[in-house]
Amino acid sequence: LFPYTTLFRSVQEFSCTLLSLNKFVQLTLSSIMQKVYCFITLLFMLSCASFESKYIIEGKLKGKTYDGEFIYLVPVEGATAETVDSVQIKDGVFRFEGDASVPSICILRTRPLLRMELQELLVVTEPGTISVILDTESSAKGTPQNEALQLWKEQKRNSDFAYTNINQQLLEADESKKEELKKLQMKYDKEYSNFNYNFVKQYKHTAVGEFVYKMTGFSFTPEQKKELNSL
């Protein structure tokens, strides 16, 4: 019986070895799959982060009249040959894309001779897709700061128009009418200043808020400036 007993034990030991090996393989495969899953998840998160910190500017023009011309994306501050980007118009459209981890104010413009036909346009290079139309009155939309900037530009245009209109009337008015027009002018000035103040207060810690503050802060009262600087 001895040989059979030894054989039986050998078979048992071999079976145990196979079971242990099987468990080891299963654990190893499970560990590998977990690592692969973690790696894929990390890649997905990195790609999402990369996308979220990227701006895309999709521009349109009327027709194909300007095909072959260049559009320049110029930083408002610190513009150099290295920081200015450019693309060529094709089929009436153009596209910029770049890093938006630190949003900034830029100007979209053409060569000087075309700027009477294609108005320069302020844009914020913030994450997301910015839809732009270049025309005699250009506009931008699609992201929060660019929507806000467009609102501010429209208000500024309306205020500039009203101010210019009053100045023209002052040149032509007699003395009795001038006092009334000056009061109206002061009223418009105050309304526009308050609009700018509230705008800056709302967007203080953004690129568009800081830009408007630099542009219009001179008209704020000392109390308004103190409050804004404390935010």
Image: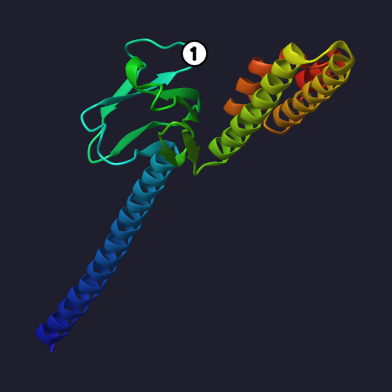
Nearest to the observer: residue 126 or residue 28: 126
Residue 218 placed where, x, y %?
Answer: 73, 12
Residue 210 placed where, x, y %?
Answer: 63, 22
In this picture the colour scheme is rainbow
Q: Quadrant of residue 165?
A: top right
Nearest to the observer: residue 69 or residue 102: 69
Nearest to the observer: residue 217 or residue 47: 217
| Residue extending farthest bottom | 1
Nearest to the observer: residue 67 or residue 125: 67
Secondary-structure class at tag 1 = loop
Q: Quadrant of residue 96?
A: top left
Residue 203 placed where, x, y %?
Answer: 67, 31
Q: Answer above or below: position of 2 versus 124.
A: below
Q: Quadrant of the C terminus?
A: top right
Residue located at (88% from left, 15% from top): 179
In the figure, is residue 204 to the left or right of 147? right
Residue located at (40% from left, 19% from top): 74
Q: Is residue 15 visible to the viewer in this orientation of the structure?
A: yes
In the figure, is residue 143 to the left or right of 87? right
Q: Which residue is mark 1?
A: 77
Residue located at (65% from left, 26% from top): 161
